[in-house]
Image (tube, rainbow, N blue to C red):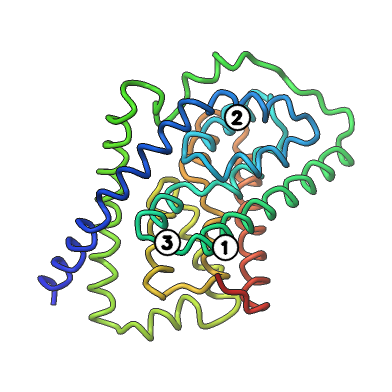
Amino acid sequence: MVIEAIVDAAADILRILPFLFLTYLAMEFLEHKAGDRAQYLVRKAGRLGPLAGGMLGVFPQCGFSAAASNLYAGRIITLGTLLSVFWSTSDEMLPILISQKAPAGMILRILGIKALIGMAAGMAVDFVVRKRDPGREERHLKIEEMCDHQHCHCGEGKIWRSALSHTLQIALFILAVSLGLNILIGIVGEGSIRSALGGRAMAGPAVAGLIGLIPNCAASVTLTQLYLEGLLSAGALIAGLLVGAGVGLLILFRVNENLGENLRITALLYAVGVISGIVIETAGLVF
């Protein structure tokens, strides 16, 4: 059974590897061309920051959520803008769906729902913050001072080299997740896994939200693979992906010195993600 699981997982990786590389190559090119401009737009958006963050957070990978954490630590963007980026960011979900030839309609619906929730919830957060603390002063720092804390260093070196590095790292994650799923299915059965993760309106999103809290790309890889395998419901997928901010949350704890605030942000990130997933689950929405 283990040998069969290894062979199946390896075959899946070899099949998607070229598409994964081409997808990352295109995304690296876009990030190099538009990454600084996106950060500039978010910084200059003012009270409309959550709208800009929600729309722009959909496209980049972990780089933008990491940048948002740095910008928030310097009080260059608002809390609502930070969270809108976290909720909307697709991390590794987008390249995996593209490389596995998921229907374009499915991809657009998932990205659209995440962006809309991120923008609406981010605007609500900023509204509450302004009401509770109308005299809050923001400390402005030069963006150059924040860049030293970046996680990915994706702007360094040649685009193809960075794309190849991303491809190999994510391919290993997919291999590990696929192998684990194949073995788990062989032991406990597909029905049992589906029942545990998606059989109840509250349990699936709650568990998926916990997976989303993993502070690296493993979260989005795991959630996307589970959904593509038919083991995760639409509501649970959205809950996990909303909570999953890639390395953004990890960077926030590193650069923002207020531990209590970081914990409250994490709790809010999780709560909105899970509640949104429960709503989608209860409504019976599918992608």
Q: Return the mark for residue 224.
A: 3
The residue where tag 1 is placed is 239
Q: Is residue 264 above or below residue 163?
A: below
The residue where tag 2 is placed is 38
Give the quarter of the image for residue 219. bottom left
Q: Is residue 10 above or below residue 64?
A: below
Reading the chain from its start, which is encountered first: label 2 or label 3? 2
Q: Quadrant of the N terminus?
A: bottom left
Give the quarter of the image for residue 96. bottom left
* Label 3 Cα neighbours within 10 Å, binned few <14 / some 14-19 / many ≥20: many
Q: Is residue 102 above or below residue 171?
A: below
Reading the chain from its start, which is encountered first: label 2 or label 1? 2
Reading the chain from its start, which is encountered first: label 3 or label 1? 3
* Label 2 Cα neighbours within 10 Å, binned few <14 / some 14-19 / many ≥20: some
**Residue, x 32% and y 21% (percent of image)?**
157
Task: State which mark lies toward you, 3 or 1.
Answer: 3
Q: Secondary structure at mark 2?
A: helix
Place of residue 263 in the rendered image (x, y in percent of width and height, measured from the top left): 61, 45
**Residue, x 29% and y 56% (percent of image)?**
174
Place of residue 230 in the rendered image (x, y in percent of width and height, measured from the top left): 41, 75
Give the amino acid type for the residue marked by disc 3 in the picture: Thr
* Label 1 Cα neighbours within 10 Å, binned few <14 / some 14-19 / many ≥20: many
Disc 3 to disc 1, C-alpha distance: 12 Å
Place of residue 135 in the rendered image (x, y in percent of width and height, measured from the top left): 88, 28
Q: Is residue 253 visible?
A: no
Give the amino acid type for the residue marked by disc 2 in the picture: Ala
**Residue, x 37% and y 72% (percent of image)?**
229
Q: Secondary structure at mark 1?
A: helix
